[in-house]
Structures are given as structure tokens and as C-alpha cells.
Image: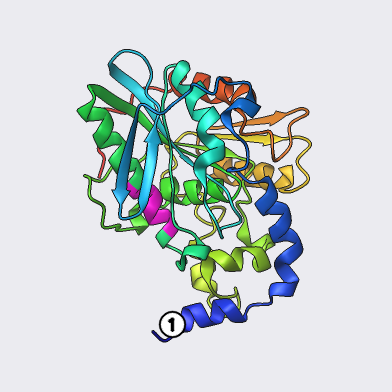
């Protein structure tokens, strides 16, 4: 099959110019640690698994009991080239223990032959499928949040803020997320043109409109009622804390209820550990007002 023009442009981008940053991001994004390395028992297992699209699945960790619970879908990092959620299992298990349903999800990335907006659409289909499964298990998912780490935080931000821009063909009824949680995200992709080219499949000069559409900082004014929690390790040398500070300022300027937590001693590899992030995320989610009176489309 002949290569598409978009794929061809992608392959022509300067690999040598991006390899150093790609390696730094890839080795430090979610998917590298096992649950036991985060101080959690190796017995922690998902309660159920959903295949939300062909070849794409998510494990769902359910809290005890039934009824109304927050649901958070966890989106892994991987420099927009890979997206392995294995490293988020420990955080998901810890969140479930704290009373939050959590679903680390597989999504497609550049190495799977897709470019924007496909990864964001996968996130939204994963949200829809997780919410549907919770309903079938006797839960009412409310509020519904999307959490991402590293490049996954960037995708999560787009899925929540710019949800109306996307029309994914999902197998479950669509759900509009109520809240956003970002862990050490490189939100302003205009500062990372070489690395983020993996997501767009083109350069900012060749398609400035696509780059603007895929930049959460440029979309910060959307859905200003949506609450946002941004967490970043103070010792992160892979994605500078300034990315979170700048995104938070844009969100606050637009009217979003925004909470920022800079974590002393945490870096890019540790910020998503259960013992670092779970209490911060769970307490914030459990304190949010119920969103059941808001229409979801």
C-alpha cells in the first residue's frame, strides 16, 4: 500500500534533531515501572477489562461498594510515539483503594501509524467505555475525569477542553469529561516542535492550523467551568515545571478553577507513582461537586 502524504512527511522529519529528547522522554514516561516498585502489593489486579476498540483495551480498578464514585481514565506518556499504560497500574490500584474508579488505557500513537486527532479520539472512546462498564457494575461515574502523564497529560487536556472538536466513532455512548488532571505535561507543543512532530505528522510551518488545534495552551479558554488539577515534580528535568506553570496561568486567565501542586523531590519518573500522586488526586476528585446536573454530550 503506498504511503500517505502525511506519513511521508512524518518520516521525512529530521530524526537526528529529535532523538536526544525522544530518548529522554521515552525512558521516563509511564509504562516502565511495575506496581511493586511503587510500594503496592503485586496482588493488586484490575476488577475488569474492557476492549473499547479493536486491539485497544483498558483495565478498570473499582473501589469497594457500589453507587456514585469518581471515575478517572489514565492516559500514559511516551513522547506521542508509544502509549503503554503498564506503569500507571500502581496509581490506578491506589486510587481504587481511596474510593476512585481508575482505568489505565491503551491508546494508539505514532508508532501505530496514526497522527492527531486519533490519539485524542481514542481517549474519548476509552472514557465512554469505562463509564458504560461502571454503570453495568452498579456504579454511577460522577464526576468523570481524565488524567494523563507527560505526553498523555497533553492528550488528556485536549480530550477534556476541546471535546466538542472531536467526533470519534466509539462503541459506547459518548461521555463529556467533567475534570482534568495533568501530571508533568508538555502542554505547549510550540516549544517542542521536533518532538511533537510525532503527534502531528507534519511541522508547524507546514500546517500551523493543526498545531494550534493540538495545543492545549491555545485551547485554554474552552469550557472555562471545568476544574483542573496540575501536578509537577520540582526535580523534573525531562519536562520542565514551567510547562505546568504556563498552562496553569492560561487556564486561570480563562476562568478555570485551577489547582497547581509542585511536589518537592519528585521527578518525571516518580510523579505518577501511587505513593506520590494517589492521595493528591483522590482527595481532589472526591472533593469535586457532583456533575450529574450538567448535560453530557
> Which residue is painted at 38% across and 22% down in the image?
289
What is the x, y in percent for residue 2? 42, 86
Write down the residue under mark 1: 4
Measured as percent of width and height from the top left, residue 131 is found at 29, 35
Q: Residue furthest bottom?
A: 2
132 with respect to 92 (left or right): left
Q: Is residue 175 magenta?
A: no
Residue 245 is left or right of residue 170, and the answer is right
Above or below, comparing residue 208 to residue 233 in the picture: below
Q: How many marks?
A: 1
Residue 238's place in the image compared with 286, above or below, is: below
Identify the main secondary structure in magenta.
helix
- From this viewpoint, is residue 294 visible? no
Q: Quadrant of the C terminus?
A: top left
- x, y percent for residue 89: 51, 32
Q: Residue at x 22, y 50 (%)?
A: 171
Q: Residue furthest top?
A: 65
Along the horizontal axis of the image, is 99 left or right of 29?
left
Q: What range is drawn magenta here?
A: 119-125
Residue 89, visible in the rendered structure: yes
In the rendered image, which quarter contains the N terminus? bottom left
Amino acid at each position: 500500500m503506498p504511503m500517505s502524504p502525511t506519513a511521508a512527511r512524518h518520516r521525512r522529519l529530521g530524526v537526528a534533531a529529535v532523538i536526544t529528547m525522544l530518548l529522554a522522554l521515552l525512558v521516563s514516561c509511564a509504562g516502565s515501572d511495575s506496581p511493586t516498585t511503587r510500594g503496592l502489593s503485586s496482588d493488586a489486579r484490575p476488577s475488569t477489562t474492557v476492549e473499547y476498540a479493536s486491539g485497544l483495551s483498558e483495565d478498570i480498578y473499582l473501589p469497594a461498594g457500589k453507587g456514585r464514585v469518581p471515575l478517572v481514565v489514565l492516559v500514559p506518556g511516551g513522547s506521542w510515539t508509544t502509549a503503554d499504560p503498564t506503569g500507571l497500574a500502581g496509581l490506578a490500584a491506589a486510587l481504587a483503594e481511596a474510593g476512585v474508579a481508575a482505568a489505565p488505557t491503551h491508546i494508539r500513537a505514532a508508532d501505530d501509524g496514526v497522527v492527531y486527532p486519533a490519539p485524542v479520539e481514542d481517549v474519548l472512546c476509552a472514557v465512554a467505555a469505562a463509564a458504560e462498564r461502571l454503570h453495568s457494575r452498579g456504579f454511577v461515574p460522577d464526576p468523570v475525569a481524565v488524567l494523563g502523564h507527560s505526553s498523555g497529560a497533553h492528550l488528556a487536556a485536549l480530550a477534556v477542553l476541546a471535546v466538542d472538536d472531536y467526533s470519534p466513532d466509539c462503541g459506547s455512548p459518548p461521555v463529556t469529561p467533567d475534570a482534568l488532571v495533568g501530571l508533568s505535561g508538555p502542554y505547549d507543543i510550540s516549544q517542542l516542535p521536533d518532538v511533537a512532530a510525532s503527534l502531528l505528522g507534519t511541522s508547524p510551518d507546514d500546517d500551523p492550523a493543526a498545531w494550534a488545534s493540538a495545543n492545549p495552551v491555545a485551547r485554554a479558554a474552552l469550557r472555562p467551568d471545568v476544574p483542573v488539577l496540575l501536578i509537577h515534580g520540582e526535580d523534573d528535568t525531562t519536562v520542565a515545571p514551567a510547562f505546568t506553570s504556563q498552562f496553569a496561568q492560561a487556564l486561570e486567565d480563562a476562568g478555570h478553577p485551577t489547582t497547581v501542586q509542585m511536589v518537592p523531590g519528585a521527578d518525571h519518573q516518580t510523579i505518577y507513582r501511587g505513593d506520590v500522586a494517589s492521595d493528591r488526586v483522590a482527595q481532589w476528585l472526591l472533593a469535586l461537586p457532583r456533575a450529574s446536573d450538567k448535560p453530557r454530550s
